[in-house]
Amino acid sequence: MDKRSFSLPGDLAARHGTRDPFRLAEALNVHVRFLPMKKQKGFCTNVLHNYFIYINENLSRQMQRMTCAHELGHILLHKDQLRRDDQGRFRRIVEMELFDISSRTEYEANLFAANLLIEEDRLMDLVREGYDIVAIASILDVNVNLLAIRLAELRKEGLEDISSRLPFTPDRKFLGNIEDRADSL
């Protein structure tokens, strides 16, 4: 597991004063474009050392934000997969089902997105205040599955026993199958 999935989002937020993936992409000179897509949520590519994130223009702002964070994670963590292939063609990371937690690279991009969009202190305050996972997802404006990934990593770190208060296991292909709203399971 690439440890930068955990550390890099906080470092970027501190350095640039934001957790907004669109503002971070701009600060990092990553070009974000919106296109009509039928099934894809988004993808990223590298063309002549210029990085691009393409996002489905038909998604809600919340889903576009999560997709941007996920694809930004790919660009920052998986640059080697975005280099030209042996025939000189530009590669891109394309997922029909984004946020598939059965793939290492997808899980790392998910962790990056979760760590970027869900600030730990705010999350733990909401947990201590007694909110459930659906309410917390709504307050933080993320999908419950992305929140579940963040919570699972906090449990592994042993920061606080929240397993009994917020039981939930993320769907391994959640972004490919969910409805476009925060409380969608």
Image: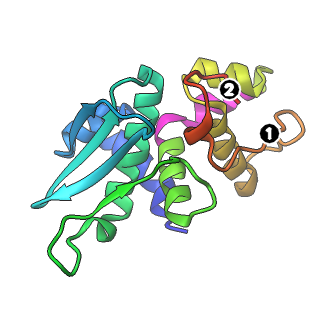
Q: Which residue is mark 1?
A: 168
Residue lying farthest left? 48
Residue indicated by mark 2: 125
Residue drawn at x 49%, y 63% as measured from the top left: 105
Foreground residue among 2 and 183: 183
Quadrant the N terminus occupies: bottom right
Left/right of residue 101 with respect to residue 128 in the rendered view? left
Res. 59 mark: none
Say if the magenta span includes residue 126: yes
Q: Position of residue 171 (x, y in %)?
A: 70, 44
Amino acid type, label 2: Asp
Cβ–Cβ under 8 Å for marks 1 and 2? no
> Main SS type for the magenta part?
helix
How many marks the image carries: the answer is 2
- For the point 72% across and 23% down, which residue is it? 134
Q: Residue at x 28, y 65 (%)?
A: 82
The answer to whether 52 is drawn above or below residue 65 in the figure is below
Up the image or down, 59 lies above or below 84; here it is above
Amino acid type at mark 1: Phe
Q: Secondary structure at mark 2?
A: helix
The residue under the point 21% across, 45% down is 30
